[in-house]
Image (spheres, rainbow, N blue to C red):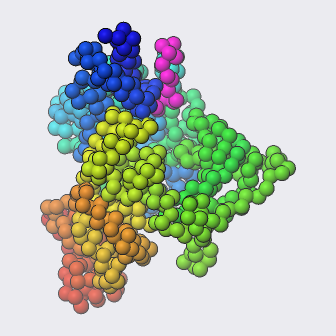
């Protein structure tokens, strides 16, 4: 037996064990998956050459390989939705006015709001049954998060049992934000540095990383806090107002933000925002704005949601933070629709605690208006503390030889196709320049694939920008269906032989792909990448048609010029001529049709979840016409949709009910011609109340 081989085997096992701990327990990897795989492959080779060195403790002998390194998925019983942003005082004024219009409230009616700082942390949902903590889950994508129950039980601010004695709801889902104070963050980084470990970038990342430790004892050693401010499923609601719910949280053992206040006018909301912006630097935790919520819960229920956001709440963000830096180059990125977006490559600069090296220049007209040139010193901001953008040029610092930037007339793709500027509906030249190569353009095909695996589409972990580009260039993935046939085509062997991949990383990727063979209808529609079909439109189409087979049939009919199919889709809320034309164009293209057919042979598309199935309105198509007296038209539509109805904008043979108020016009006449049942507002509400 070779002494050198035995020594190297021992060294490799020790090194692999160290990296396992860094990755799986400390959430602080120091090497890439590829480097880890090379260590494992070297160990396997030595053990094959010297089988006498193999022991049961060797990393190569573990059943199933390394720990999954994953948390179980938890589907939220009530989605954890996002908030719309208000970036200016005018946005807040509009927010309040929209509430007045929706609820039909006169200017003299007082609307109370809770106002509280918007904590920059990690959203968390805690489920209590009969007062006992049974699970904790991260927000994830809003519908599905990660099970971090073991870790939340070691956070001091989170009670294991709700206090206050009897009267507890059977089920209580308490939601809020896990955060780390700035002082605790600095102390933790000092501790990490002394131990020779990597330091964290900011308090939010350190809080998120601390909560996602596979070893709860590590989480217990991290100074995490939790503020409660919202709820999910509640078998019985213990208060009638948002403020009352905050008080209930405090009574049950939770911390609520002591800066939260009850405000009674838009002027008071704006004053609260200014007050918090001044206090921001003195607080021991990070905030990036304030949140306003309508206080009355019955009004919240009436207001409901639009797209992913509640109508009754808004996040009033603080002004973007700014810095100056130098433009080193301008690069053109080609998006999935062929749009050419110029990106300024910057001397790295810190803006609001984040290092920025790229910033958008939007389009050719934006560059021309600002007269941005290579070598210019520019002002950069992170809009809403998120998206870096160039605001303007510091002219006095411009180099003497700086030349105006010439926007390309030829796409940077290998096809070198012509760049065109679209025309607007008014016949004028549009701002967006596009590659005319369509799907033949490799950039667009790659971007379509990136969009397909993105977070709000198929969300395939481990298949990001770098991997998609590599797989496309290697010819392994040319269209979405190819992703799901990688294993069947024995690409795993080729992947393992390619630099940057190994047994572990390939196994993780193939498992992530398999986990996404089933997908919701709205995500599937969005993933197809049809122009003008974003998340909101995809959700409206899913709700309107209910199943992929029904929508697919409608789209094929559109492509064939079916007038009735076009009228039916046009009658749907949030669907207009632009979307209809895009769908007709997409599905009339045989290349696209083939992509979709091959994809649906590989995945299962779940039917849309209906808001209600047992109400008197479930499954019915309703048209509202004329004015309503007890509620606004928008409120009536939202109510009908919550009860499972499909709201249409025009009367057809497929209409089940027409709700007509005073001043009803042609729609009422059309209903009479078709024999459609007509109700007035009182009859409609009676039908709703009948269940």
State which region is magenta: 193-207
Report if residue 204 lies within the magenta region: yes
Q: Position of residue 482 (x, y in %)?
A: 33, 55
Q: Quadrant of residue 636?
A: bottom left
For this view, does 209 lie left or right of residue 320? Answer: left
* Residue in view at x 59 percent, y 36 percent: 355
Q: Is residue 167 above or below residue 330?
A: above
* Residue in view at x 26 percent, y 50 percent: 488
Quarter placement of the C terminus: bottom left
Q: Is residue 484 above or below residue 134?
A: below
Q: Position of residue 462 (x, y in %)?
A: 38, 42
For this view, does 263 lie left or right of residue 103? Answer: right
For this view, does 400 lie left or right of residue 462? Answer: right
165 or 534: nearer the eye?
534
Q: Quadrant of residue 42?
A: top left
* Residue in view at x 51 percent, y 42 percent: 289
Quarter placement of the N terminus: top left
Report if residue 401 lies within the magenta region: no
From where the camera sits, is residue 224 visible? no
């Amino acid at each position: 037996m070779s002494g050198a081989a035995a020594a190297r085997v021992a060294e490799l096992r020790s090194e692999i064990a160290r990296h396992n701990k860094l990755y799986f327990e400390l959430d602080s990897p120091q090497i890439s998956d590829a480097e880890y795989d090379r260590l494992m492959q070297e160990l396997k080779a030595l053990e094959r050459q010297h089988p006498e060195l193999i022991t049961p403790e060797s990393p190569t002998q573990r059943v199933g390989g390394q720990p999954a390194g994953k948390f179980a998925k938890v589907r939220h019983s009530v989605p954890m939705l996002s908030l719309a942003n208000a970036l200016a005082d005018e946005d807040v004024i509009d927010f309040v006015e929209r509430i007045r219009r929706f609820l039909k409230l006169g200017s003299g009616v007082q609307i109370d709001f809770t106002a509280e700082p918007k904590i920059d942390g990690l959203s968390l949902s805690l489920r209590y049954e009969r007062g006992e903590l049974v699970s904790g889950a991260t927000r994830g994508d809003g519908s599905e998060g990660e099970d971090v129950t073991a870790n939340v039980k070691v956070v001091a601010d989170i009670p294991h049992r709700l206090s206050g004695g009897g009267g507890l709801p059977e089920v209580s889902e308490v939601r809020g934000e896990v955060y780390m104070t700035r002082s605790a963050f600095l102390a933790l980084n000092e501790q990490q540095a002394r131990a020779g470990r990597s330091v964290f970038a900011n308090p939010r990342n350190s809080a998120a990383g601390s909560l996602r430790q596979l070893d709860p004892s590590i989480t217990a050693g991290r100074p995490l806090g939790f503020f409660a401010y919202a709820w999910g499923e509640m078998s019985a609601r213990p208060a009638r107002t948002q403020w009352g719910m905050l008080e209930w949280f405090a009574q049950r053992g939770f911390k609520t933000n002591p800066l939260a206040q009850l405000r009674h006018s838009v002027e008071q909301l704006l004053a609260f925002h200014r007050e918090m912006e001044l206090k921001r630097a003195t607080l021991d935790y990070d905030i990036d704005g304030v949140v306003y919520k309508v206080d009355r819960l019955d009004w919240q229920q009436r207001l409901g949601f639009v797209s992913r956001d509640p109508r009754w709440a808004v996040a009033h963000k603080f002004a973007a933070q700014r810095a100056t830096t130098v433009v080193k180059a301008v690069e053109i990125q080609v998006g999935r629709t062929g749009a050419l977006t110029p990106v300024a490559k910057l001397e790295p600069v810190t803006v609001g605690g984040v290092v920025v090296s790229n910033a958008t220049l939007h389009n050719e007209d934006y560059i021309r208006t600002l007269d941005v040139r290579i070598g210019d010193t520019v002002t950069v901001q992170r809009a809403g503390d998120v998206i870096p953008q160039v605001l303007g040029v510091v002219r006095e610092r411009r180099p003497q030889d700086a030349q105006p930037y010439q926007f390309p007339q030829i796409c940077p793709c290998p096809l070198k196709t012509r760049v065109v500027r679209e025309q607007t509906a008014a016949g004028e030249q549009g701002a967006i320049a596009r590659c005319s190569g369509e799907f033949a353009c490799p950039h667009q095909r790659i971007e379509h694939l990136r969009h397909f695996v993105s977070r709000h589409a198929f969300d395939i972990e481990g298949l990001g920008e770098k991997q998609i580009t590599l797989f496309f260039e290697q010819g392994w993935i040319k269209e979405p269906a190819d992703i799901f046939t990688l294993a069947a085509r024995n690409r795993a062997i080729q992947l393992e032989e390619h630099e940057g991949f190994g047994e572990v990383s390939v196994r993780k990727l193939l498992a992530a792909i398999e986990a996404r063979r089933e997908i919701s209808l709205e995500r599937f529609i969005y993933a197809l990448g049809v122009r003008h079909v974003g998340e909101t439109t995809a959700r409206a189409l899913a709700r309107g048609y209910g199943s992929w087979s029904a929508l697919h049939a409608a789209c094929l009919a559109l492509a064939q010029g079916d007038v009735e199919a076009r009228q039916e889709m046009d009658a749907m809320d949030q669907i207009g001529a632009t979307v209809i034309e895009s769908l007709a164009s997409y599905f009339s293209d045989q290349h696209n049709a083939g992509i979709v057919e091959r994809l649906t042979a590989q995945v299962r598309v779940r039917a849309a979840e209906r808001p209600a199935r047992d109400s008197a309105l479930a499954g019915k198509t309703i048209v509202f016409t004329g004015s309503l007296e007890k509620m606004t038209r928008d409120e009536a539509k939202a109510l009908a949709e919550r009860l499972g109805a499909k709201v249409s904008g025009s009367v057809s043979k497929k209409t089940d009910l027409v709700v007509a108020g005073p001043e009803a016009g042609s729609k009422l006449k059309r209903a009479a011609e078709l024999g459609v049942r007509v109700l007035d507002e009182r009859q409609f509400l009676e039908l709703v109340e009948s269940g």
